[in-house]
Image: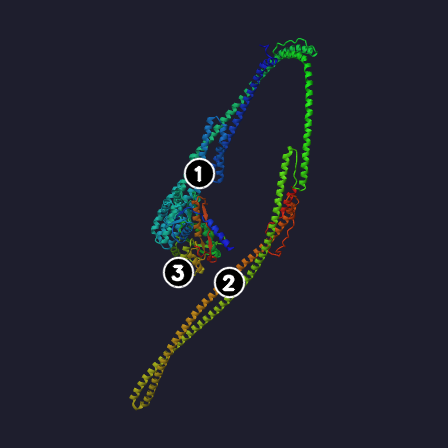
Amino acid sequence: MNKLGILGIAAIAAVAVPSLASAKTIGVAMASLDAYKTLLANGIKSRGESLGLTVRVENADKDSDRQIAALKDFVKSGVDAIIVNPVNGDRGVEISKIATDAGIPLIYVNSEPINVDRLPPKQAFVASKEAEAGTLEAKQVCQDLGGKGKVAVMMGELLHPAARRRTEYTLKTLQSDGCKGIQVIEQQSANWSRDEGAELMREWLAAGERPDAIISNNDEMALGAIRSLKEAGIDMSRVKVAGVDATKDALAAMKRGDMAVTVFQNAAGQASAAVDAAMKFAGGEDVPSKIYVPFELVTPANVAQYAGKN
Amino acid sequence: MWNKLGIRSRISLGFVPLLLLMVFLSVNAVRGVEGVSNLFASYRHAADQSLAIGDYSEALNTIRAAADHIGSAPGGADVTAFDAGVSKILADKGRVDDLFAGETAVLDQLKTVRQDVSTFSDAFHQIVDLDKERQSLISKVTDFGPWTEIALADIMRSSWRGFDIAALYQGAQTYAAISKSLYYSERFVQAGDIDAYAQAQAELAKAIAGQEALAKMLKTDIQLGRSKSALQLMKNYSARLADMKDVVAKSNNLRESVLDVLGPQLQSTFAKLQSGIVERQRALGPQAEAMASSTATSTLVICGLVVLAGLVLAYALGRLISRAVQQLAEVTQQIASGNNDVAVEGVEHKHELGAMARSLRIFQENGRAKLAAEAEAERSRRAAEADRTSREAEKAAEARKLEAAFRQLSKALQRLSQGDLTVRVDQLDPAYAEIRDQFNTSVESLEATLGSVVTSTSSIRGGLKEISIASHDLAQRTQQQAASIEETVAALTEVSNGVNRTAESAGSARQSAEMARKNAAKGGEIVSRAVAAMSQIEASSQQITQIISVIDEIAFQTNLLALNAGVEAARAGEAGKGFAVVAQEVRALAQRSAEAAKEIKDLISASSSQVQRGVELVTASGKSLDEIVAQVGGMSQIVSQIAESAREQALSLKEVSAAADQMDQVTQQNAAMVEETTAAAQNLNSETEDLAAAVGRFTTRAAGGARTAAVPAARPAAAARKAVPQMRATGRGGAAPRPAQAEESWEEF
């Protein structure tokens, strides 16, 4: 009986993996390789390699000119598909044109390009809805605080739509019924970085602010905030810290009781969806122009099931 | 010439002028009606044309209304209405062009109209696309703009907290510029005001310059990062605003250069076409009236002429024919009364009456030839009568032969119907020899076929018996198999119980190990308490040593004092003599107590070193107890692993046992199936018997074998009728209905 089940699964897996006539190459242009983007890049690599593809990863290190150059280089070396995590989504039209002119399928991943609603054929956008992340973490914090208290919001680089959308929906959620007793006392950017998150928290503490919760646009800044709160000798059980990404460090912090909320952004899911969409385009099939991988709420109650996922 | 013509030709020729007149009349009438109907067709055609142009005009109005509306409130409904209008004009091309066939000027105009409409449509769709782009750009501008303010406020807040007054001031300047820019851009977005766009961009340029200046004043990474984001947001905001301006300009341009020009132009073209058609329609009415009245007049005149000519012709022809006919009638009457010698006149005329005169003369001659012919006819009738009588005698002989042949055949067929296949037909008239041969051959082959059926039936019966025996054996073996599997299940249950017991024992072993570990741990505690007690002893010894040192010190001081006292007593002379003795005694006592103290000190230091050793030993025993605890722990773990694997073993055994149970079930089902097979074989056997009996009814030359074989074979005892609980009807039982069918076909035969 069990053997039959295993055989069935094996058969499905065999069907799901597209057969490739010749080894194809995917060019991957990453905006940077921070904790989450490293996961994403690794996910793309492993998914691609499991399909027998050659995967070339370029890191633009937050320099959008460097990223454009990398894309042109991909085109010149004749890759079969490009996956790009844009540094500056505002250059979406330019990036799309490079791929369209070369006739190469292009997948945007994780960061939204400006032309997301008007993508040319053979191009798609794979991400999770940032609004969802902001809503999920704020709702949980609101619930943890019982609908009242003081909250400080840490924003990512405002250049990124992700930072803007997460912040926007965090604030919107805090204004909804049941959370109206919550007051946002601070709202500043720490550029996604852990050190800068720590610095910003120190600044707030020095200014005499004592928030009941920190809602951060990502886990890194949240971990920085936790570091400064601890240095100031504040009892972590009295401050709820929320982030997004469910990185390894964040999950560890949650297990220690330092972090209250994070939101799992499915890096492997996004990576697989991006590679699969790219291969479908390369094989002449059609793909919807927007593919959303859902965010998932992580709290101490379910943290165990996310261990090792990111 | 006239005389040579027949009467018919003369009448025909006489009617020619009349006919010509009538033809002329008809042609005239037809032409008149045709002319009027043509005019009506043109009228209807013009009406169709007018209607078509009217439709176009209406479609154009729909198109223009949609185009006017799209700027103020864009929506899908307008685009649908517009496309419907355009397709009305473009798709109707064939029908409308047919309506205007031949009118080159109008066709050219229509062609231009269609071109204009498709240009208009292209422009409209471009505007719709541009409008979509504008909406998307508005969403970007309204995203970037306010967020730029948030980013700046963010920087200023940290500058304020850091007492960076210069940066705060610069930030405020930039913030003011951004706010102004947002105000102007809002005006541009809402009202399409190009001046407001220029002001928005100018303020934005100031803001960007201000931001760059601000960036130079900032020092920390976090502030620099924020500034970079703010600057990028501003640049994006500026670029999107510029894009939007382009889109608005393009859209306005299309509207002014295409929509606003082509719309009125199309409208006036349609108006011109319409008025041309109406003019033509107006001219057609009087034209039709004139044609109708002229046709009526000419028709009346020609009718009069026809009547006149007809009357004249009728009179002339009537006279001609009646005279000649009267003459002929008289002659005919004479001949009829038997006067063959009367003279027939008018034989020389070529027309029909001349021919009639000639015929009358021939009648006269025929009367004379008639008598001779009647005698000849009587002779030939007699000859035919004699011929018919001889042929009837021949036919009677033939019928007798046929009857004899049929009688023989019928006898043979009667025997055949009673099942006698040995029957043959012997002698027959040679004419029927072929039928006889065919009959004999057919019966022979039938006999041969039935003979082989009989043989096959007996061999089938033999085979069936074997099948019966084999399936009976199979049933027995299956039962044996079922029994062995049941034993296997029982054995497996025992093994599984044994493994369960092992698991339980392992569990209790683990508990004992756990207890041992706890006891060992308790021993360790005792050891550490002993170590603590010893340490306390050591500490007390040390305190004692200190106290002894104090005593020793006191003894030393006492000795010194006694010595001094002795010196003082000696100095006092005789009076101090007694005191000197006491001092001496005190000195001796002090010395003794010092000695005792020294001894105690030695003893204590010896005991202290012993205590030290004791502590060491106890610590060592504590350590070894710890090791024991660890080892017992390991042992307990191993034991629990054993327990776990025993449990797993028990589980696997349960699965094996379940598999054996399944095997048992399957075997039971097999037994049931075998039983069914046996039953089916028996069924088949009895059907074969029936078949043999049916075949036995026929008499053949090899009849002996067929009749004796029809003895029913002993039916095998109903094998393995034991109740099988899991038995299910798995067979389809297809054997039963077939033999009935076979019987039917035999009877039919």
Reading the image, the residue beneath label 2 is B647
Q: Which mark is residue B613?
A: none
Q: Which residue is mark 3?
A: A231
Location of residue B653 with respect to A128 vertically, above or below:
below
Distance from disc 1 to disc 2, alpha carbons, whole Å, reads 77 Å
Tag in front: 2 or 3: 2
To which residue does mark 1 refer?
A: B127
- Callout 1, which amino acid? Ile
B603 over B361 or under it: above or below: below
Q: Nearer the viewer, residue A296 or B514?
A: B514
Q: Is residue A105 above or below residue B344?
A: below
The picture quadrant where one finds residue B555 is bottom left
Location of residue B402 in the rendering, given as x and y in whole percent from the top left corner: 67, 32
Looking at the rendered image, the quarter that the N terminus of chain B falls into is top right
**Which amino acid type is marked by label 3?**
Glu
Which three-letter amino acid code belongs to the residue tagged 2?
Arg
Q: Quadrant of the C terminus of chain B?
A: top right
Q: CA distance from mark 1 to mark 3?
A: 60 Å
Helix or strand or loop: what does disc 3 sit on? helix
